[in-house]
Amino acid sequence: MIESPLLTHLKGYIGGQWLGADSAETLAVSNPADGAHLADVPKMGRVETLRAIDAAAAALDQRASLEQRARWLQQIAKALRAQREEMGRILTMEHGKPLKEAQSEVDYAAGFFRFCAEHVDRLGPRTLEERPRNCSWDIHYRPAGVVGLITPWNFPIGMIAKKLSAALAADCACLIKPSAKTPLTMIALFSLLERELDLPAGKVNLVTGSAAPITDALFEHPAVRLISFTGSTEIGRELIRKSAEGIKRLTLELGGNAPYIVFDDANLEQAADNLIANKFRGGGQTCVCANRILVQGEVAESFAEQVAQRVRRMRVGNGLEEGTDLGPLIDDNAVAKVRRHVEDALSKGARRLAGGNAGAASGNYYPPTVLIDVPKDALCNREETFGPLVPIATFQDEAEAVRIANDTEYGLAAYVFSGDLERARRVAEQLHFGHVGLNTGTGPTPEAPFGGMKQSGYGREGGYEGLYEFTEAQTLPHPE
C-alpha cells in the first residue's frame, strides 16, 4: 500500500467533502513496475456524478473576481512547486515513468496555473472602439457553466492542469474524472486544493470510477455545458455523438500519429538527441511523441545508427531507481501492442538495429527498439504504437515527405529537421498538424495554444486561446 501525507483520504471529493461510493465498491490501483497493490479508490458512478454536478451548479452562484481567481491559480502553482517531490513520487508509483520525469511533469503542470494567473485579466470585460448603431458595445466573458474534465492516465497531473487552470480562470465549476489507472495523483492534488485554497464548496469535485456511468451522467445533466476530454479518437467520436442531444460544447485532444521528418541536410546528432527526448518521454506513451520516423534516403542508415547507439545506452527499470531512463508501460495490453507492432514490421522486411528479443520482455517492461526499412503497410505506420518503438522509413524528396506525413487521419503533432530553415517552414505550412516542431522535438508549453487538426480533435489548451475555451462571450450594446 502506498503511504503519503497527500493521500490521507483515498476517496472522491464532492461539495467540499471526501466521500466513498454509495455502493462501497472500490477499484484497485497497482504499480506497473512490479504489480504491487497501491490503493483502493471508490468506484463511483451515475448517482455520485449527478450529486457532484448539483454541487458544482450551486457553486456557480458564488462568483469570483478576476483578482480572486488569480490568487487561487497562484496558490495552486506554488503548492505544486512546493510538493513536486512527493507529487512526483506518487505519480511514478502509479504510472511508472522515471522520478525526474514525473517531477518535471509537476513543474509543467504548475506552469499552466502560473500562466493563467498572470493572464486572467484577458477575461475581463472590454469595450469596442467602434460605435455601431450609436451604441457602446461591451463584451463580457462569462463562465461556460459546470464543466466536466476527463483526463487520461499518461499525464496524471499535466493533463488536468491544462484544463483546470483555464476553467478556474473562467470561473467555472468543475467535475473531474481521472483515469481509473492513475487516480492517486489527482487525489493528492485535491488534498492540496483543500489545504491551500479557500474555494467555495462544489467549485471543484472529484469523481473516481469507471468511465461509462460517469460520462453518461455528464451528458445527461443540463447544468453541464462543456466537457473537455483527452483520450482516444474512438472515444472522442462517441462523445461527439452523445453531445448532440444536449447541444453541449466539447474540447477534444485525441489520438496522434506524429511524423518525425529528417532531411539530408539536417544536423543528424541534433535530430537524434531530440528524437530520444521526444520518443521515450513517458515510455513513448504520449500522443505527441514521434510515431513515424521519416528520413531522407541518403542519410537513413547513418541517422538510424546514431539513434540505435543512444538507445543501447538506455537503462530500463523501476522509475524510482536512480539512473532509470525508461520505466514500465502502463499494463500488459500496452506491452502486447508494442510487441505486435515490432513483430509485424519485422515480418514485412524491417531490420532491428537495437532492442532485445520481443519475447524476452518481462512484466510491463519492453526494451526500447529501433527498426529500419519499415514498410509503408506496417501496423506501426497506421496505428499509434504508444510505446518505445522507433520505426524508421525513408523518403526521397520534399514532396514525398509531405505526402507520407499527411497520410493519416490524425493531426496532432509533427516534427521537421533540416539545415534549411526556410525549407522546414515551407514543409510545416503543408503539414496538417496543430503542433509542428522545427529542428526541435519539444512538445506543448503553457504559453502557447495546443490542439489537433483532423481526427485529433478540436479546441485548444494553453496560451490565450486556451483561456477562452471555458468562457461564453456575451455582448451588451447600450446607448450612452
Image (cartoon, helix red, strand yellow):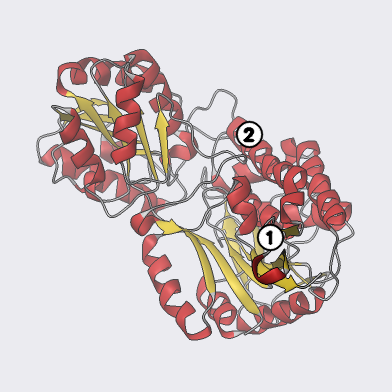
State the residue in front, 28 or 73. 73
Residue 345 visible, this angle: yes
Residue type, mark 2 in image: Ser
State which quadrant residue 173 falls in.
bottom right
Callout 1 crowding tier (Cα within 10 Å): few <14, some 14–19, many ≥20 = many
Could you tell me which secondary element the residue under label 1 belongs to?
helix
Q: Residue at x 28, y 55 (%)?
A: 409
Picture coordinates of residue 139 (x, y %)? Answer: 70, 64
Q: CA distance from mark 1 to mark 2?
A: 23 Å
Residue 367 visible, this angle: no
Rendered-image quadrant of the C terminus: bottom right
Picture coordinates of residue 453 (x, y %)? Answer: 38, 53
State the residue in front, 436 or 207. 436
Picture coordinates of residue 259 (x, y %)? Answer: 30, 38
Q: Is residue 57 above or below residue 451?
A: below
Mark count: 2
Residue type, mark 1 in image: Ala
Please state if 306 lies on the left or on the right of 64 as rendered. left
Please state if 416 lies on the left or on the right of 89 as rendered. left
**Numbered label attached to residue 104:** 2
**Numbered label attached to residue 28:** none
Q: Residue at x 9, y 35 (%)?
A: 349
Q: Is residue 46 above or below residue 205?
A: below
State the residue in front, 266 or 365. 266
Q: Which residue is denoted by mark 1 in the rendering? A: 167
Could you tell me which secondary element the residue under label 2 belongs to?
helix
Circles 1 and 2: CB distance less than 8 Å?
no
State which quadrant residue 428 falls in.
top left
Marked residue nearer the N-terminal end (1 or 2) = 2
Mark 1, mark 2: which one is toward the viewer?
Answer: 1
